[in-house]
Amino acid sequence: MAADWRLMLLLGILLLVGGPANGEVYTALAEMEELLETESVLITNLEGYIRVQEDKLNFLKNKMDEYQREHSDASHDITAYVSNPINAYLLTKRLTTDWRQVENLMEHDVGTDFLQNITQYRSLLKFPSDEDLNGAAVALLRLQDTYQLDTSSVARGKLNGIQYSTEMSSDDCFELGRQSYVNHDYYHTVLWMNEAMARMLEEPTNHTQSFTKADILEYLAFSTYKEGNIESALTMTNELLQLLPHHERANGNKRFYEKEIAQQLQLRKMKGDDGTDEMPKSDLPVAKSDPAIFDMTERRAYEMLCRGELKPSPSDLRSLRCRYVTNRVPFLRLGPLKLEEVHADPYIVIYHDAMYDSEIDLIKRMARPRFRRATVQNSVTGALETANYRISKSAWLKTQEDRVIETVVQRTADMTGLDMDSAEELQVVNYGIGGHYEPHFDFARKEEQRAFEGLNLGNRIATVLFYMSDVEQGGATVFTSLHTALFPKKGTAAFWMNLHRDGQGDVRTRHAACPVLTGTKWVSNKWIHERGQEFRRPCDLEEDHGEFAI
């Protein structure tokens, strides 16, 4: 009964507040938290459903026991039993009104109300969609790749050697492989279908599996073929046909694989003019590239920085200092700012204690109801659109909305020495499952003619990024060409200039947000534009060396 009252209370609150907002749940962990409320209501509803079903079965079981006792007594001497008028009456009653009651109860579905509740909940509670499931699966695979996580370790609930959750079942692994297959990601399909197979063999008592060994073999065979290993695909298909000899698709694939293998063998035979199976090896020396040149792609640098494997050299760090600064602001003489230099050229710094816990809590509360999927600007049309390389939700807060925001904006002006009248509103961002933002520039490049055209404030001259939460693992801001990573620390703020003094974009400020491995990442940022900075950071015909306006 207590569970029913909790259910009614929660539903009453939801009715007063209103229905759920539409949107992708997986793109912000703040919204993922609401799914636990949904699960709590569904569990309570399921408990009620099971309870009434058990009450029904217990009633029928008691009736059955009663009837069996009477029938057993009658079987010892049927004539004597029915000759007793009371027994005759009771037997007649059992086979009329009693059995009619039992029959009616058997026909009545006592769980109908609970099934109807679920339909009602879908209009009141936040439910994830199939898109959310796919997004969550892709996010987990992104984390696996970026942080080089072993498949079996992830399945055991371990992330970078730390046990965070319960183990995944074979069903969980199978679904992750299936989602990969749907996305034509055959590499991860093979990884997770193999893990599902291994776990299925370890779970002989699992009666809730939604798949069979044959299902796994079918996914594995085709994915292995798509990865170029036809021989293994044929072997798995033959194993599948041993289980299901009349599997139509498997039989068709078997014939196709055998034909492909035969053609490959014939092609290899044709390569040698003398009829040998293989082309003769050349006697010429193999040219080698200069071993001193390390060819590192941006993707590799990005992932290594995220893992903390790539760092600035000692010579790059030698000149960097930490100090108290007033930035020529009289007020700061009473309480100077704590500045930590991160990179010399371009000049990137971290301000410590740049935002206080009380300010962070208020900004989070204001942002939550306004969260929308974070967008990027189309380089051709200038329109804002969502992108799979930016997984987060954001909200925009105006300076005049609250005194706390005014204080944060004034502090931003003190930290940068720049005019805030041309700054964009404070953007608050919460990253979702594996939330990330791949390498990008904050400024608009020359070819992006329509960028910021509605603002008429010029290009983005500077960025201030506030970290509003600590992150257990992952979530760093990395500058791929500088080999520099900034790991989130609650209350700190990063600051850098996006443009040189001649107005050209500083391409060295290209940066990215690493996927959040564990924990939740909250940030806010101020993008400051050129207009109004003429006397604070005068233009020059030459590129600067990254110094601030102050």
Image (tube, rainbow, N blue to C red):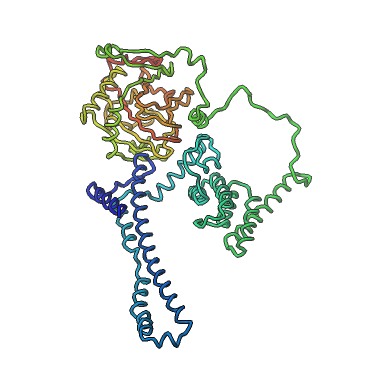
Residue 121 x, y percent position in the rendering: 31, 54
Q: Quadrant of the C terminus?
A: top left
Residue 469 x, y percent position in the rendering: 36, 30
Q: In this view, does 186 lie to the left or right of 13?
A: right
Residue 229 x, y percent position in the rendering: 63, 47
Residue 145 x, y percent position in the rendering: 52, 37
- Please state the total of marks drawn on the protein image: 0
Is 130 in front, or is 167?
167
Q: Is residue 120 left or right of residue 206?
A: left
Is 168 in front, or is 544?
168
Q: Residue 49 occupies which quadrant of the picture?
A: bottom left
Q: Which residue is drawn at 56% across and 52% down?
A: 203
Is 2 in front, or is 275?
2
Q: Residue 370 occupies which quadrant of the picture?
A: top left
Q: Quadrant of the N terminus?
A: bottom left
Residue 50, above or below 412: below
Q: Which residue is drawn at 32% across and 52% down?
A: 3
Residue 382, above or below 210: above
Is 445 in front, or is 508?
508
Residue 5, above or below 312: below
Q: Residue 98 occupies which quadrant of the picture?
A: bottom left
Q: Which residue is drawn at 40% across and 69% down?
A: 62
